[in-house]
Amino acid sequence: MTKPHAVISGASIAGLSAAWWLRHTGWDVTVIERAPAFRDGGQNVDVRGVAREVLDRMGLVPAIRAVNTTETGTVLVDRDGRVRAELPSDGPDGATAELEVLRGDFARAVLDALPAGVELVYGETIDEVQDTAGEAADGADADRVTVTTGTGRVLHADLLVIAEGVRSRTRDLVFPDDDVDARDLGVTMVFGTIPRTPTDDDRWRWYNAVGGRQVHLRPDPYGTTRAILAYAGGDGLTGVQRDEAVAALRRRYAGAGWESERVLDGLAVSDDVYLDELTQIRMRRWHRGRVVAIGDAAWCVTPMGGGGASLALTSGYVLAATLSARGPGRPSRRDLDAAFGAFDRWMRPLVDRIQGIPRGIVHFAYPQSRLGLAARGVADKVLTSALFRPVAAKLTRVADSDVPLPPIVAHAV
Ligand SMILES: Cc1cc2nc3c(=O)[nH]c(=O)nc-3n(C[C@H](O)[C@H](O)[C@H](O)COP(=O)(O)OP(=O)(O)OC[C@H]3O[C@@H](n4cnc5c(N)ncnc54)[C@H](O)[C@@H]3O)c2cc1C
């Protein structure tokens, strides 16, 4: 029997999870990644909710524990670094989750565990997608999706999985504009690795300043510190050179206090500064013909929503599970429609729950005035008090579901 063939574009958490699960369920898999080699790096993410079960089914919980960021809790600090509130981090889904990991370490753990036979192609992108149904003139089966890469390589497949992250180009090539709603959340985040100092500890320390500015410091397992500047507003810094960006950030963070000067000095010499104006992706449908989008490409929830890495991992599993239900061999369009429908029904409630963050949350999370900051301080105290702790704990319970994961029907590879 001819094995079905999937082309997956994007070799991060979603794409590699799909590759892992599709290969285990009898597919030939080719993964295309734009970067010239595996993309390491990235900031602190976590594994929450059902993603823990997916990870467990992959046998990868020990691998993730081995590269845990070492973070033990989350505290809100004042201008002098004094703790003014502690967010609940007890249990697997607290503010600091049980499984905290750097994005690159997470993706590498999946990469290292890929079953034999997954083809990985680096330094390539998809330039053209042709999704054709029916028979070719010579009677051959022409019902397939054909992708042409930037170097002219042509691949015929039964399925194209787009897992290229929030700014996916292939998604925009395949899906009409009407299907993709990219919402600017009005928040910019700047990430970088800076030297660790003796004042850094094993907690995520989070500081709010007036002017809608935040500073975050988090531990990593490599003896350095992960710093984040997050602020309300965008000043068109995406894509600008590090030195120019840091100069603009120095103006924005003038007088912000706490460790902001140290973070800016660190970013000024850091070689992994990454700046992102947060964009939420909402798609009316995630599939079209033989093409499906998963992970951030399909539903970027942004770090403001949380759970993006967990949804990305889970989506690879759910896709393979819903496809496995149709039995072995090459799937017809009807098979794919049924599988994509089941995929949508399972994943969409999880995505919707995270994306439903109220619009006013940016004003609350990033207060502009002293009054706003004081109100935020009171709210933090109330939310983290013993009485409201269960409510606060619920806020970090994302990517979870009461509906069991769909089963995988395994076929011999
Ligand atoms: C600072 C920060 C903190 C976060 N915190 C959390 C958290 O606590 N919990 C959580 O669950 N999530 C968190 N996230 C989100 C999480 O990192 C993402 O949701 C997750 O990485 C999405 O995975 P993905 O595979 O869909 O996309 P990505 O990780 O974005 O990967 C996309 C891949 O596709 C490749 N690519 C892009 N374009 C192309 C192309 N045209 N052709 C081929 N390849 C292409 C890219 O090089 C990349 O390898 C955080 C993110 C950030 C930035």
Image (cartoon, helix red, strand yellow):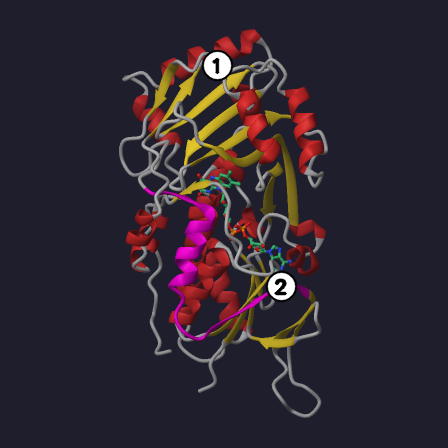
- Quick check: is 110 in the magenta stretch? yes
**Quarter-wise, where is residue 371 in the image?**
top right
Depth check, front residue: 40 or 270: 270
302 on left or right of 205: right
**Residue at 63% in and 16% down:** 254
Q: Residues within 10 Å of mark 1 (few under 14, many from 20)?
A: some
Q: Residue 89, relative to residue 130: is it above or below?
A: above
Residue 3 percent coordinates (x, y): 46, 81
Depth check, front residue: 412 or 124: 124
Mark positioned earlier in the residue sequence (2 or 1): 2
**Residue at 42% in and 50% down:** 105
Residue 298 percent coordinates (x, y): 56, 51
Q: Residues within 10 Å of mark 2 (few under 14, many from 20)?
A: few
Q: Residue 34, relative to residue 330: is it above or below?
A: above
Name the amino acid, label 2: Gly
Q: Which residues are magenta?
A: 99-126
Q: Residue 137, relative to residue 251: is it above or below?
A: below
Q: Residue 80, relative to residue 358: is it above or below?
A: above
Disc number for residue 123: 2
**Residue at 56% in and 59% down:** 10
User: Which residue is disc 1 drawn over?
Assistant: 376
Q: Is the residue indicated by label 1 positioned so its CB lies within 8 Å of ligand 1? A: no
Name the amino acid, label 1: Arg
